[in-house]
Image: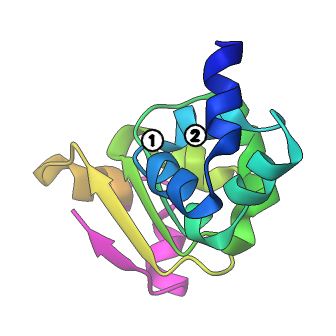
Amino acid sequence: MEHLRAQLEDLPNEILLIILKKLNAIDLFKLKDLNRRNNNILYDEVMTSNLKLFKLDNELINLLPEIDYKIKSLNVELFSMESILRATTYPNLYKLGLYNADENGAFFIAGSEVQYLFIYLFIYLFI
């Protein structure tokens, strides 16, 4: 593993960005605090503006308030949506993608406390 880390550190930022973009958000942010260079890349707007969160992970939920102002597009599973949206305010969020949603998803949204996002923030919703 140490040998692999040394090889990754030798890559230029542009190549490292291409590789890191292939990871899902949970795996991506496990690299947090590995070194200063990784943190700069991970917290860059290119990496944080469009997040795909398909599993709930407490570490990632706790990280969301640190990057909430950078998140513009968020893709989540329907039944983890409420926990993720309650984690922070997402001041620049304009697009929300819902996965694993069916016709019951609309009733779930209408019956939950997160419906205010759709009413007051006018975010673009993909189901």
Say few, some or many: other residues with alpha carbon within 10 Å of mark 2 (under 14 / 14 to 19 / 20 or more): some
Seen as rendered, the residue at the extreme right is 36
**Label 2: element kind:** helix
Asked if disc 1 and disc 2 are in contact, CB closer than 8 Å, the reply is yes
> Which residue shows up at 75% across the image and 47% down it?
38
Residue 20 placed where, x, y %? Answer: 51, 47
Split into 4 quadrants, where in the image is the C terminus? Answer: bottom left
User: Looking at the image, can residue 88 be seen?
Assistant: no
SS at badge 1: loop
Residue under circle 1?
23
Residue sitting at 21 percent across and 42 percent down? 100
Instruction: Look at 45% across and 32% down and name the residue there.
Output: 55
Query: In the rendered structure, which segment of residues is drawn in magenta?
Result: 110-127
- In the rendered image, the vertical position of residue 62 relative to residue 105, given as above or below: above
User: In the depicted view, which residue is nearer to us: 126 or 33?
Assistant: 33
Residue 28 image label: 2
Q: Mark 1: which amino acid?
A: Leu
Q: In this view, does 100 lie above or below 106?
A: above
Q: Position of residue 22 (x, y in %)?
A: 40, 47
User: Local crowd at mark 1 within 10 Å, few (<14), some, or many (≥20)?
Assistant: few
Residue 90 position, x and y percent, is 66, 70
Q: Does the magenta stretch include residue 122?
A: yes
Q: In this view, does 123 lie above or below 39?
A: below
Q: What residue type is labelled 2?
A: Leu
Q: Give residue 92's position: percent from left, percent from top.
A: 63, 81
Q: Which residue lies furthest to the left in this view?
A: 103
Q: Would residue 107 appear left or right of 33 to someone viewing this image?
A: left
